[in-house]
Amino acid sequence: MSLLEYNEVTEKKYIVLDGQPYEVITSHVFRKQQRKPVNATKLKNLMTGKVTEYSFHQSEKIEEAEIDSRELKYLYNSRGEYWFADPTDPSKRFNVNEEVIGERGRFLTANTVVTQLLFQERPMGFKFPITADLKVVDAPPSIKGDTATGGSKVITLETGATINAPLFVNKGDVIRINTETGEYRERV
């Protein structure tokens, strides 16, 4: 167990607050007029997913969370359940509810390796790859001169997810997307 100073609580760090693990989303150290400095943060509760704002003062010390992780292989999803297995032993399978996976689950393809985060041996969430290369299964044809609407169209990916992409993307193309934002990045 290590303790962090108020100004060491920065983005992407994990802390324990009131016995719950939190991920620091944003942090900003500043002074208000003549007062002592504070660190204004946005924290995401890793158990519930709720985001809260919290200010750490100069005199506070914060416990850093010890987060364990394990690699898992995504198998498939069915009826709102996502199935995973141990990469070394496929017989050790388990399912996770759709609410736990969140929006980024729509970009998972079979055999994708993800990282499960554990806090005190309790599962609390997943880390997905930041980018994914997916095949376009449906894209409306682009019509010459159709850039008045901003130059994008809605396409369907092999996982069933729909995103906005530039007009030059066609059915059968493989594109790279950002799984955090759900946006088109480039054609592969």
Image: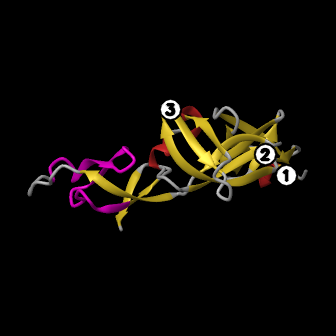
Outermost residue, left side? 144
The first of marks 1 and 3 along the sequence is 1
Residue 52 in the image, given as x and y percentages of width and height: 66, 33
Mark 2 and 1 residues: CB-CB less than 8 Å, in contact? yes
Question: Is 75 on the left or on the right of 67, as rendered?
Answer: left
Which residue: 49% across, 40% down? 77
Q: Residues within 10 Å of mark 2 (few under 14, many from 20)?
A: many
Numbered disc 2: secondary structure: strand
The first of marks 2 and 3 along the sequence is 2
Numbered disc 1: secondary structure: strand
Report the mark closest to the observer, 2 or 1.
Answer: 2
Residue 86 belongs to the span the image colors magenta:
no
Which residue: 21% across, 61% down? 168
Q: Which residue is mark 2?
A: 15
Quadrant where the C terminus sits is bottom left
Residue 163 belongs to the span the image colors magenta:
yes
Q: Residues within 10 Å of mark 1 (few under 14, many from 20)?
A: some
Q: How far is mark 2 from mark 1, CA to CA?
A: 9 Å
Q: Which mark is residue 80?
A: 3
Nearer the observer, 9 or 128: 128
Amino acid type, residue under disc 1 in the picture? Leu
Residue 99 in the image, given as x and y percentages of width and height: 56, 32
Q: Which mark is residue 4?
A: 1
Amino acid type, residue under disc 2 in the picture? Ile
Amino acid type, residue under disc 3 in the picture? Gly
Nearer the observer, 83 or 186: 83
Can you say whether 95 is above or below 150 in the image?
Answer: above
Which residue: 75% across, 45% down? 118
Magenta residues, as a range?
Answer: 147-175
